[in-house]
Image (spheres, grey):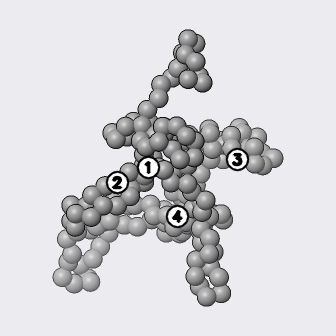
Amino acid sequence: MAFFRRIQKKVNDLWYPQSVTWGKAVTTREVADELSVLSTVTRGDTYAVMENLGRVLSNFMGQGRTVKIDGIGTFYYTATSTKRGVPTAAEVSASLINGVRVRFLPEVERNSGRQVTTRSMVNTKIVWEEWGKASTSTGGNIGGDDSGNPGGNDGDQGENPLG
């Protein structure tokens, strides 16, 4: 289940849904655990590969290449400049570059009409619930408060988990 909250844009005073993330970020170990369950590779081997993935991507992109990982998408660098253009092409040099960003394009499949039919990183069966409202699918209160806190507590031995 994914969550959204209502936000009002100052530019036009209209209201929009905005996705909300909650809890701690999923760790490399958690991803490695899931991948090892789905494959014949051990968690340790999966973790070791994932731990080195950033360095490998950085090396390839540093050579000016894009990196396409099947089932995930394409990673590439873009340069950021000082935002001060120069009058002539002859004045353009690497000294105008002041940073690098990593860009990502999720993998897509297209039909014969070139329309996108699937996106590998997008779950098409997302159930959206408003953050902090009673859930229609679980019958209980989900989310947390409007400040982004997921709510709930760690529990203790004296607490009845069923209410």
**Of residues 156 and 163, the one drawn nearer to the viewer in this rendering:** 163
- The vertical placement of 128 against 104, above or below, is above
Q: Give the image quarter of residue 106.
A: bottom right
Query: Gap between marks 4 and 2, in whole Å?
Result: 32 Å
First in residue order: circle 3 vs circle 2: 2
Label 1 environment density (alpha carbons within 10 Å; few <14, some 14–19, many ≥20): some
Label 3 environment density (alpha carbons within 10 Å; few <14, some 14–19, many ≥20): some
First in residue order: circle 4 vs circle 1: 4
Q: SS for tag 3?
A: helix
The percent position of residue 125, horizontal first and vertical second, equals 61, 59
Camera-near label (3 vs 2) is 2
Camera-near label (4 vs 2) is 2
In screen coordinates, is 9 left or right of 30? Answer: left
Q: Is residue 63 visible?
A: no
First in residue order: circle 4 vs circle 3: 3
Query: Gap between marks 4 and 1, in whole Å?
Result: 32 Å
Query: Gap between marks 2 and 1, in whole Å?
Result: 8 Å
Disc marking residue 75: 4
Residues at marks 2 and 1 touching, judged by CB atoms closer than 8 Å: yes
Pick the quarter of the image with the C terminus. Answer: top right
Q: Which residue is drawn at 59% across and 22% down?
A: 161
Q: Which residue matches tag 2?
A: 6
First in residue order: circle 1 vs circle 3: 3
**Of residues 160 and 73, the one drawn nearer to the viewer in this rendering:** 160
Task: Kindly identify the amino acid type of the residue bearing the numbered disc 2.
Answer: Arg
Disc marking residue 35: 3
Q: Residue at x 19, y 71 (%)?
A: 84
Disc marking residue 130: 1
Q: SS for tag 2?
A: strand
- The vertical placement of 127 against 76, above or below, is above
The percent position of residue 97, horizontal first and vertical second, equals 30, 66
Label 2 environment density (alpha carbons within 10 Å; few <14, some 14–19, many ≥20): few
